[in-house]
Structure formats: structure tokens, C-alpha cells
Image: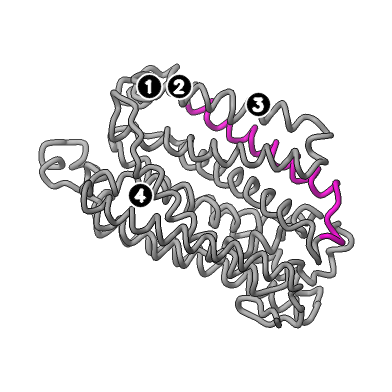
Amino acid sequence: MIAAAPGGESDTMMPDALERRLALWRGRALRVALVAGVLALLGLLLDPQGFFRSYLIAYLFWIALPLGAYGLVALHHMVGGGWGFVIRRILESAAATLPLMALLFVPLLFGLDDLYPWARPETVAGDALLQHKQPYLNVPFFAGRAALYFSLWIGVVSVLNRLSARQDGSGDPAISRRLQLLSGPSLPLYGLTVSFAAIDWAMSLEPHWFSTIYGMLFVAGQGLATLAFATVALVMLADLPPLVAVVRPKHFHDLGNLTLAFVMLWAYMAYSQYLIIWSGNLPEEITWYLHRGAGGWQYLGVALIFLHFALPFLLLLSRRTKRSGEALLRVALLLLALRFVDIYWLIAPAFSPRLFTFGWLDVVLPVAIGALWIAAWTRNLESWSLLPNDPNMDGGS
């Protein structure tokens, strides 16, 4: 099979074993997506409101991977490093799923009045604060902003991937400089647009509450989730060519260090938001934490403290853990699971502030969206060489 990179050409031959493994993953993912999709449609018919609420949580979890991949690819083009070369194609293939995520965003537009108080005219009519925010929080502007975010994300990723594919064919070192120059402004663009998307899609669920750190909390979480996913994928593919000839313990060590940095960044953002709001003790701000500190939600908060921060932090301090693919795989899987718990803790109490809830749709919809996303990711990954033809690779490895 001749591999053709998205947006360009490549003469690299994909090894049969790798092609078979990716095809096996994709086939299984599509079968799971079909079954979960049927169950999700049943849930839509039986409980439309519950469907849209679970869909939003699942969507926010899975879109973190292509968006985090966009940010990490741009970061790698800026700073280099062997860690980025071995996972670059994993990340580029993940970022290339953004058109799919744009399509999967559309169902949310049909459930806005089930999700957001500002989308219900009767609620806005009786709330002076929502009336004040209506020039920003209204359905047409909300949809327009989402369209703008996706246009910018897909545009940037397409240009970066196209240049990367062109370099595969030519090996031109000048392309590395172009990728660096484009990645510089794309990083603040990523941070700005993701922050606004987090405000629109998540924080506006409780429009009386606000936090200036909220967007960066999502940025840190996306980077952490994507690093965890890329680590899992790398470990599961590292025994096959061409990665088997390149991947070494030092690459896992670098990924472990970067994951540790993102664990600490996420914890710093989460604690800073809590400290500022709790010390301010303003009723319109502190209520958000009160909803998440009782009724069963507090146990998720405790789990996040110990399992999302303390345990990975301690494990990733160990050089032995970071240089072992199997050990790092277990840490990465734990972090992926806890990323879903964090998203659930951030979003679900907006709908049930007094009592912890978790229904069957909260399982079905993440599985349905995730299986479809993994199928698209494997298709993208199969379409080009697993290692970039970058002249800086030897120096960065």
C-alpha cells in the first residue's frame, strides 16, 4: 500500500503488520460505534433532555484530543525534541479529525434550550443578568462563534499537516522553518479560541458564574488528555516497524516528563481557581463550588485530587516508571479515565446540583463518539508514514 499523507503525497510503504493492526482497530471501533449509536438513538427518543446533557459531556471529553493534538503539534514545531518526532503522526492524525468533530457538534445545536438557561426565552425574560448578557449569549451568535472556532482550527491544522506531508516527499529543511513560523502565532490562537469555546460550551451552562482561569483549565486538560492518548498509542504501536527501530526508553522518559508537567499545570490551574474564588467568598462565585462539594459530587472532587494529581505526580517522579513503556501506559490510561471524571465533575452538577447522577447514557454516548473518533483517527494514521521525513529528526531523537 502506498501511503499518501493528508494534503500531500508520500512514497513510504506502510508495513503490512501495521496496516493490519490499524484495520483491526478500525473495524472493532466501527462495530462498537454502530451498537452504541443505536442505543444512543434509543436514549434520544426516551429521554431527549438526558441525551443532550450526556452528549455534551461526551463531546467535551473527545474534542480535547484533536484540539490538544493541534496545540502539541504546534508546540513541537516550535521547540523540537525527540518526544515529538515519535508521536507527531499520532498527533497530526488526531488533529485531522477536527472536521468530524465539527460535524458531531451539530446535534448540540438542536438541544440548546435543554442545556443552556440563556437559550430559553422565558428564563431570560425573568432574569436581569441574562438580559444583560444576551448580546453575547444568544443562539445565532453562539452558533456563529462555534463555526468560527472550527474554521480557524481546521484551517491551521490543514496547513500544518499539508506542509508536513510535503516535507515527507521532498525532505526540504526549509519546510521545518515554515512550520515553525506558522506554529508561533497558531499557539496563542489555540489558547484564545479554546478559552472562548470553553466559556461558550461549558461555563455558560451556569451563566451567573464566571472564572477567568476556566479556559486555561481546559487548555491544560486537553494537553494532558492528548499526551496520555499519544502515549497509549505509541506503546501499542512501538513493537511494529518503523517505530520499533526508532523508539527508545529515552522517548518514553521525555513523554513522562512532559506528562508530569501537564499534571502539575492542570493542578495549578484548578487550585488557583478554587483559592481565588473561595477566598473571595462571593455568593455568585462560591455557589459553583458548593454545588460540587455536596450531594455526592464531593467524592469525585476527592478522586480528582488523589488520582488525577497526587498519584500520577508521585508515579511520574520515578525515572524507572518514565523509561518503561508498560508502566507509562498504565499511568496514561489512569489519566485518560480521570480526564473523563474531571469533565463530568465540571459539567454534570450544572444539571443536578444537589444530587450526584450518572445514567446509562453517560456510558453509551462517550463510547459511541469515542469509537467513531478512533475509527477516523486510525484511517488518518493509515494514510501516511508513521515517522516524518524531517531532517531535524536525527538531531531531535
Q: Is residue 362 above or below residue 62?
A: above
Disc on the earlier residue, 4 or 1: 4
Q: Which residue is mark 4?
A: 55
**Label 3 belongs to which residue?**
311
Labels 4 and 3: the sequence-earlier one: 4
Determine which residue is flagged by label 2.
299
Q: Can you name the residue that lies furthest to the right here? A: 395
Q: Earlier in the sequence, mark 3 or mark 2?
A: 2
Numbered badge on residue 383: none
Quadrant housing residue 109 = bottom left
Residue interval drawn in magenta: 244-273
Task: Say few, some or many: other residues with alpha carbon within 10 Å of mark 1 (under 14 / 14 to 19 / 20 or more).
Answer: some
Q: Amino acid at mark 1?
A: Gly
The residue that mark 1 highlights is: 296
Left or right of 93 on screen, residue 60: left
User: In terms of sequence position, does the residue under pointer 4 or pointer 2 come before the other?
Assistant: 4
Labelled pair 4, 1 in contact (Cβ < 8 Å): no
2 and 1 marks in contact (CB < 8 Å): yes
Measured as percent of width and height from the top left, residue 306 is found at: 59, 23
Q: Callout 4: few (<14), some (14-19), or many (20+) C-alpha neighbours within 10 Å?
A: many
Mark 4 vs mark 1, CA separation in Å: 22 Å
Counting from the top left corner in percent of width and height, residue 138 is at 24, 52
Where 30 falls versus 292 (above or below)?
below
Residue 338's x, y, as percent? Answer: 54, 36
For the residues labelled 2 and 1, the Cα–Cα distance comes to 6 Å
Decide whether residue 190 is among the magenta residues: no
Q: CA distance from mark 3 to mark 2?
A: 16 Å
Q: Nearer the viewer, residue 99 or 335?
A: 335
User: Label 4 sits on what residue type?
Assistant: Tyr
